[in-house]
Image (cartoon, rainbow, N blue to C red):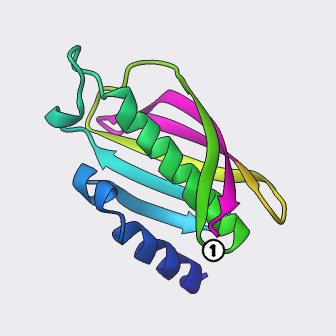
Amino acid sequence: MDDIQAFARQVFESQPFSQFLGAKLQSTGPGTAEISIPIVAHLKQQHGFVHGGVISYLADNCITFAGGLALGGNALTSEFKINYLKPAVGSSLIARAHAKGVGKRQAVCLCEIYAVDNGDEKLCAIAQGTVVPAA
């Protein structure tokens, strides 16, 4: 388990975009991942809500980590779909993904993204994606 977590941290820390956004890899396991990001002014759109692209990044990256860990190594998202349920407001976002179906060539993962405000989590988006091993 420590090797999986060390591998995941190494991969995450090598992602310049994740570092730019201030994202943190909170936890990993075989087929699971949790990533958070602080809600700051430059991540919001004109109405004061977190931009959908930031939420989409969280879903995509969290799905890829969960699927990659389920498949045992480096992976890429081959597709994903996201449903935005409500505007994201608060102090941070947290994405939690887990692999639901794992085969030799792909893992199908689900991800829930929550907006956290004063410790309360509100579901703001749900995503599903397919992850494949990186060539």
The quarter holding residue 106 reads bottom right
* Side of 62 where 13 appears, left or right: left
Instruction: Please tell me whether mark 1 sits on a helix, a strand or a loop.
Output: loop
Q: Is residue 115 magenta?
A: yes
Residue at point 64%, 48% (across, down)? 78
Most prominent secondary structure in the magenta stretch?
A: strand
Residues packed near mark 1 inside 10 Å, few (<14), some (14 to 19) or many (20 plus)? some
Q: Residue furthest top?
A: 47
**Which residues lie in the magenta part?**
109-135
> Which percent across, then down, holds residue 16?
29, 61
Asked if residue 16 is positioned above or below residue 111 in the image, the reply reads: below
The quarter holding residue 24 reads bottom left
- Residue 135 in view, yes or no: yes
Residue at point 35%, 39% (across, down)? 119
Asked if residue 131 is positioned above or below residue 134 in the image, the reply reads: above
Residue at point 44%, 72% (across, down)? 11
Residue at point 52%, 46% (across, down)? 60
Work out whether residue 74 or residue 12 is closer to the camera in this orientation and state it: 74
Q: Residue furthest left?
A: 41
> Which percent across, then down, holds residue 57?
42, 43
Task: Give the amino acid type for the residue marked by disc 1 in the picture.
Answer: Gly
Quadrant showing the C terminus: bottom right
> Which percent across, then down, holds residue 17?
31, 55
Q: Residue furthest right?
A: 103
Asked if residue 102 is positioned above or below residue 3 in the image, the reply reads: above
Q: Which residue is mark 1?
A: 73
- Residue 32 in view, yes or no: no
